[in-house]
Image (spheres, grey):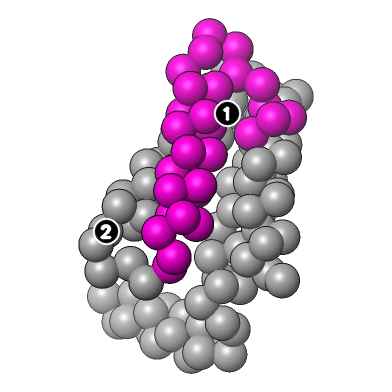
Amino acid sequence: MQNVSQAAQAYQAAASYRSQREQEADVFRRISGALKAARDAGPTQRVQAIADNRRLWITLADLMRDPLNQLPQNLRASIVSVGITVQREMERDMPDLEFLIGINENIAAGLAG
């Protein structure tokens, strides 16, 4: 249990040196990396990468719909719209991983500035 506490403290210390936007961009980059790795991997890795991407976009949609979110309403609506398109793509029998990777990379780039 002490190791978990030490890890949490180390993460908090490291996170304080990076902006929240940069941390959010890293989440998109990590998911994009998993999708890239899944292109040439077996079905299990592909399903896992898509599931992780799905969780990311569901969470993002929930955050955009939160009435306390301080982003401009038109930006939040645009992000939700992109999220709906991403969700539809992930529902296909064979989602276009290049499309999903491209969307995530564009979001990460926008967050990183």
Dominant secondary structure, magenta: helix
Which of these two is toward me, 95 or 79? 79
The residue under the point 73% across, 29% down is 98
Q: Which mark is residue 87?
A: none
Name the secondary structure under disc 2: loop
- In this rendering, the answer to whether 56 lies above or below 54 is below
Name the secondary structure under disc 1: helix
Q: Where are the magenta residues, as a range?
A: 71-100
x then y, percent, for residue 74: 46, 55
Residue 29, by quadrant, is: bottom right
How far apart in space, not on screen, are marks 1 and 2 (Cα)? 32 Å
Mark positioned earlier in the residue sequence (1 or 2): 1
Q: Amino acid at mark 1?
A: Gln
Q: Which mark is residue 66?
A: 2
Residue 45 counted in the magenta span: no
Which of these two is toward me, 59 or 80? 80
- Horizontally, is 41 left or right of 46 in the view? right
Q: Which residue is mark 1?
A: 45
- In this rendering, the answer to whether 63 lies above or below 112 is above
x then y, percent, for residue 73: 40, 59
Residue 72 counted in the magenta span: yes
The residue under the point 32% across, 81% down is 5
x then y, percent, for residue 17: 58, 90
Count neighbours of disc 2 (C-alpha within 10 A) and say few if under 14, some if 14 to 19, many if 20 or more: few
- In this rendering, the answer to whether 13 lies above or below 82 is below
The residue under the point 60% across, 19% down is 95
Is residue 82 visible in the rendered structure shown here? yes
